[in-house]
Image (tube, grey):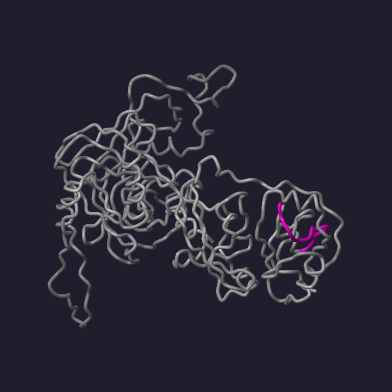
């Protein structure tokens, strides 16, 4: 069972890489890019393995010194200030100069920010009202970043520069330069800033798709303000799903055991070749400090975003207008899929690219452009990175057969991301049936309202069907791989069901369509 991240620790940025789609290099001009892609510095290992008296050979640990000498100067410390009003924190013993102050300011629930009674609290609101401050610039945040072009472009986390009125970048040679934000994308937590300079040291961008679990990596950043701190560890896992923020894209995080802490945010994660393969973005912690688990945004993913931010200051994302869920063992068994793989389509938005292309609720997406889709995160990541207007080939499992559907990808709009909640329906008197549902023929007005051509209306429900979320008034469109056109076809379909196997229904209501898998009650 997945353990939920502590609310105060979730999203603490760590100093390493965020990635984007495709191993894209990022540079302001060709000459800068040519110099940025200098050969990587190999890590020096011992000439021969160490042999113990018993004859066993011990693996020699890598020496990162040359790597750090080469690329450490391209990692910068980022400080931000703001003049905007900020709710004062009421954390005993915590100074505004403490590196944890910004962490708690960002992640402490609003109810925990109350000003003490008699200290700036509006009349009648006691200590529950936050104290508002305005005036001279004051410290806002601390983070890290890395230079990607000799003329001053720097990649960091979006949350590092969020709400900043002034950004100061500090280099290892003690230079301090003011920076401006070129673009920041909250969905990926990637930002690009720029300083006015030339001839800057740059990192080498790697390929995060080649990252392997168990390989050595290092982080360079400014934990608690200690600039250019180097920590090392190994990759613990790849393609970790969204960890904290439901508004973020399905970023395939790289998990490591590299020590990262507040202030590491936006710094690079490097492999043994000295290549940046990620941007440190989050840690798992119950205290706010490193607890052995940190997460980085893969650099391929991040650079796709960074390139778009540099080119136009914003990021475009693809969408096809469906809600999806990962295929479970029960769904696979009920649909006669060889294994639990793919993403099953639940709802399809009106006038969406998916609807126009002919995709249907209950279709299981197995491949897109030949790339295997293991679950819903894979589908989301792939579609998000497709340029709007492009065509993709979607291979789906429908009614027990494979089918290819060409879909023209649309553009994801922020205002279209809210989800509708189905309204509760009144319960009817339960009638016993094999699935625990009783159905009736569709009425013309219901069919027109739901914009469906077939199906039967649920009249009553009980048992496991009720527990699975089926309600009176729902319309059943499909039973496993069988399309339902009327009550007779429904009865025929359930008569052929194996009582020992799960069943998957495609159901429609006023909110759209959804997929409901469950195991019918025995007997």
Q: Residue furthest left?
A: 47
Q: Quadrant of the C terminus?
A: bottom right
Could you say where residue 490 lies in the image, as x and y percent from the top left?
78, 68
Residue at horizontal 51 percent and vertical 28 percent from the top: 114
Residue 387 placement, left or right of 179: right
Q: Where is residue 325 drawn, in percent x and y?
A: 57, 59
Q: Tell me where residue 221 appears, x and y as whole percent.
A: 27, 46
239 vs 56, nearest the viewer: 239
218 or 199: nearer the eye? 199
Q: Which residues are magenta?
A: 451-463
Against 430, is 434 above or below?
A: below
| Residue toward you, 225 or 199 | 199
Q: Quadrant of residue 209?
A: bottom left
Q: Nearer the viewer, residue 54 or 162?
A: 162
Extreme-top residue of the structure: 123
* Image position of 241 (left or right of 100): right
**Which image quarter: residue 124?**
top right
- The quadrant of the rendering that contains the N terminus is bottom right
Is 432 left, or right, of 137 in this rendering? right
Q: Position of residue 388 (x, y in %)?
A: 45, 50
């Amino acid at each position: 069972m997945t353990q939920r991240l502590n609310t105060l620790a979730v999203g603490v940025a760590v100093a390493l890489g965020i990635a984007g789609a495709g191993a894209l290099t990022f540079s302001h001009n060709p000459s800068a890019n040519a110099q940025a892609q200098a050969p990587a510095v190999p890590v020096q290992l011992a000439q021969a393995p160490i042999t113990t008296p018993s004859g066993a050979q011990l693996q020699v640990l890598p020496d990162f010194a040359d790597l750090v000498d080469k690329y450490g100067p391209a990692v910068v410390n980022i400080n931000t200030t703001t003049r905007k009003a900020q709710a004062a924190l009421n954390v005993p013993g915590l100074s505004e100069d403490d590196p944890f102050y910004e962490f708690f300011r960002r992640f402490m629930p609003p109810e925990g920010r109350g000003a003490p009674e008699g200290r700036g609290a509006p009349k009648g609101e006691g200590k529950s009202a936050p104290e508002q401050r305005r005036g001279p610039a004051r410290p806002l945040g601390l983070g890290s970043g890395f230079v990607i072009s000799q003329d001053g472009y720097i990649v960091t986390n979006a949350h590092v520069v969020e709400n900043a009125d002034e950004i100061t970048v500090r280099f290892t040679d003690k230079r301090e330069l003011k920076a401006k934000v070129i673009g920041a994308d909250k969905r990926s937590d990637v930002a690009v800033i720029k300083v006015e300079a030339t001839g800057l040291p740059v990192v080498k961008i790697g390929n995060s798709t080649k990252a392997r679990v168990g390989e050595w990596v290092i982080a360079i950043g400014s934990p608690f303000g200690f600039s250019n701190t180097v920590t090392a560890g190994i990759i613990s896992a790849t393609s970790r799903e969204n960890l904290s923020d439901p508004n973020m894209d399905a970023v395939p995080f790289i998990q490591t055991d590299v020590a990262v802490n507040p202030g590491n945010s936006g710094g690079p994660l490097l492999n043994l070749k000295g290549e940046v393969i990620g941007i440190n973005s989050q840690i798992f912690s119950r205290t706010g400090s490193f607890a052995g688990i940190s997460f980085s945004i893969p650099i391929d993913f991040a650079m796709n975003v960074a390139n778009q931010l540099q080119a136009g200051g914003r990021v475009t994302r693809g969408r096809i207008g469906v809600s999806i869920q990962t295929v479970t063992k029960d769904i696979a068994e009920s649909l006669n899929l060889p294994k639990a793989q793919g993403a099953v389509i639940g709802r399809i938005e009106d006038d969406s690219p998916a609807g126009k292309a002919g995709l249907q609720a209950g279709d299981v997406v197995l491949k897109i452009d030949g790339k295997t889709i293991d679950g819903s995160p894979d589908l989301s990541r792939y579609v998000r990175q497709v340029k709007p207007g492009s065509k993709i080939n979607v291979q789906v499992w429908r009614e027990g057969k494979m089918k290819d559907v060409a879909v023209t990808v649309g553009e994801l709009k922020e205002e279209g991301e809210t989800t509708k909640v189905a309204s509760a329906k009144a319960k009817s008197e339960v009638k016993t049936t094999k699935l625990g549902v009783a159905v009736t023929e569709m009425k013309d007005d219901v069919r027109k309202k739901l914009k469906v051509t077939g199906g039967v209306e649920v009249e009553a429900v009980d048992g496991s069907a009720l527990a699975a979320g089926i309600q009176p008034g729902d319309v059943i469109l499909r039973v496993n791989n069988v399309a339902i056109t009327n009550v007779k076809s429904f009865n025929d379909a359930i008569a052929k069901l194996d009582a020992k196997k799960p069943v998957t229904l495609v159901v429609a209501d006023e909110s759209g369509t959804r997929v409901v898998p469950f195991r019918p009650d025995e007997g």
